[in-house]
Amino acid sequence: MSENKILLEIKDLHVSYGAIKAIKGIDLHVNKGEVVAILGANGAGKTTTLRTISGLLRSNSGEILFNGKNITKTPAHNIVNLGMSHSPEGRRVFGTLSTEENLLMGAYILKKYDPKTLDWIYNILPRLKERRKQLAGTLSGGEQQMLAIGRSIMSNPKLLILDEPSLGLAPVLVKVIFKAIKEISKSGVTVLLVEQNAKAALKLADRGYVLELGKISYEGSSEELLNSKTIQEAYLGKKK
């Protein structure tokens, strides 16, 4: 695999919360243009992994390389400037600002936001255009999730990190969210996705990793993981 294909690479990453070892030496990579899913049960270390990649948590040891640059000790705001955007679990929208003001906040690292990017977001998530003057705090959960994703791509990132984008949403809204993620990927943005809806994630992703208790237990193409009996029983609700 040629090095210039790899956008994100993690080498032997260890992360602890005090005496508790949350991540125990994981290795993973994301190639340019891919959608990669990280699956696993609650407490497996998925969110910790994402927060460490984007600089919100500090690792105990290991390396994180982004676009060939070692960012292991780089502050989060500098990582955003390098072209990484993180849409966190829980949406974290600014409730007292309008939908459009929230979107424009996503472009704060740019000298001037690109109106074409805003128009494109409204095109792939038309509900946001309908609600653009509405206070974000009054939006439904699904609309807030759309807003969080839209805000994350206003900075034109190279890598978009999504943490549980379908959590708590009705199936009809899950389809809207995943359709939008597919459009984002088709536009050339690389996507790293943590998702409990394993089936939806693997249908969208090129490859996947399964985290169990801070270690990667399985990895492979989406097709391989979808067809694995172990994965089917543990995460897709299928029995032998």
Image: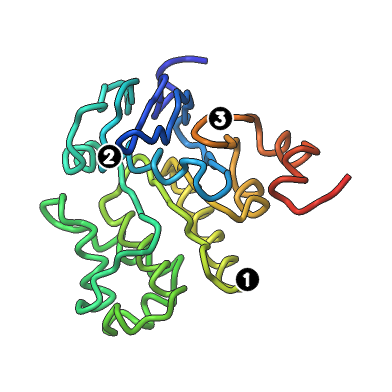
| Residue 74 falls in image quadrant | top left
* Closer to us: 235 or 191: 235
Q: Which of marks 2 and 1 is nearer the N terminus?
A: 2
The residue lying at 60 percent from left, 66 percent from top is: 175
User: What residue is shown with label 2?
Assistant: 57
SS of the residue at dot 1?
A: helix
Question: Quick check: 112 left or right of 203?
Answer: left
Question: Quick check: 123 left or right of 110?
Answer: right
Between disc 2 and disc 1, the foreground one is: 2
The residues tagged by marks 2 and 1 sit, at their Cα atoms, a distance apart of 32 Å
Q: Which mark is residue 56?
A: none
User: What residue is shown with label 3?
Assistant: 216
Q: Residue 203: give x, y in percent of width and height.
A: 66, 49
Residue 53 visible to the viewer: no
User: What residue is shown with label 1?
Assistant: 171
Between disc 1 and disc 3, the foreground one is: 3
Mark 1 burial class by Cα count in 10 Å: few <14, some 14-19, many 20+: few
